[in-house]
Image: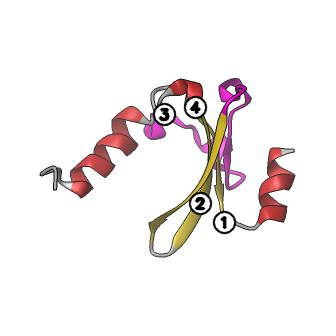
Amino acid sequence: MYCVNGKHFADLYRNKISCYTDWCEQELGCGFYFNTDNIGPYMSLDETCLSNGEVWTFLTNKDGHGGKGTLAAAIPGTKSDEIISILI
């Protein structure tokens, strides 16, 4: 519709905008990403299927407007008990 290559856009977001490549192994070594510095008064919770049926839950700060400092948590799965225990 907007003549945007979806794969190119996804790669651009993952490698440039989200700073995914800058995350160190220690942060993802426990299986999830959590950054308390990005938590604010207006948060958003969303589930997304990344690839091969792998579903993740993302907690983002709405004040970041999708830029740097927006992602507060990336947690694999959608089970509310697991998500709540990690966030608490």
Measure the C-alpha gap from mark 1 to mark 4. 22 Å
Element carrying mark 4: helix
Measure the C-alpha gap from mark 3 to mark 2. 19 Å
For the residues labelled 4 and 2, say whether their Cβ atoms are less than 8 Å apart.
no
Q: Considering depth in this image, is 27 or 80 the residue closer to the camera?
A: 80
Measure the C-alpha gap from mark 2 to mark 1. 5 Å
The residue range painted magenta reads 19-42
Give the residue at the far left of this rendering.
3
For the residues labelled 2 and 1, say whether their Cβ atoms are less than 8 Å apart.
yes
Q: Looking at numbered disc 1 in the image, what kind of residue is underneath it? A: Gly
Please give the name of the residue rendered at 24% of the width and 56% of the height, measured from the top-left corner: 6
**Circle number at residue 62:** 4
Q: Nearer the viewer, mark 3 or mark 4?
A: 4
Image-based side of 49 in relation to 4, left or right: right
Within-10-Å neighbours for mark 1: few <14, some 14–19, many 20+ = some
Specify which label sits upstream in the sequence, 1 or 4. 4
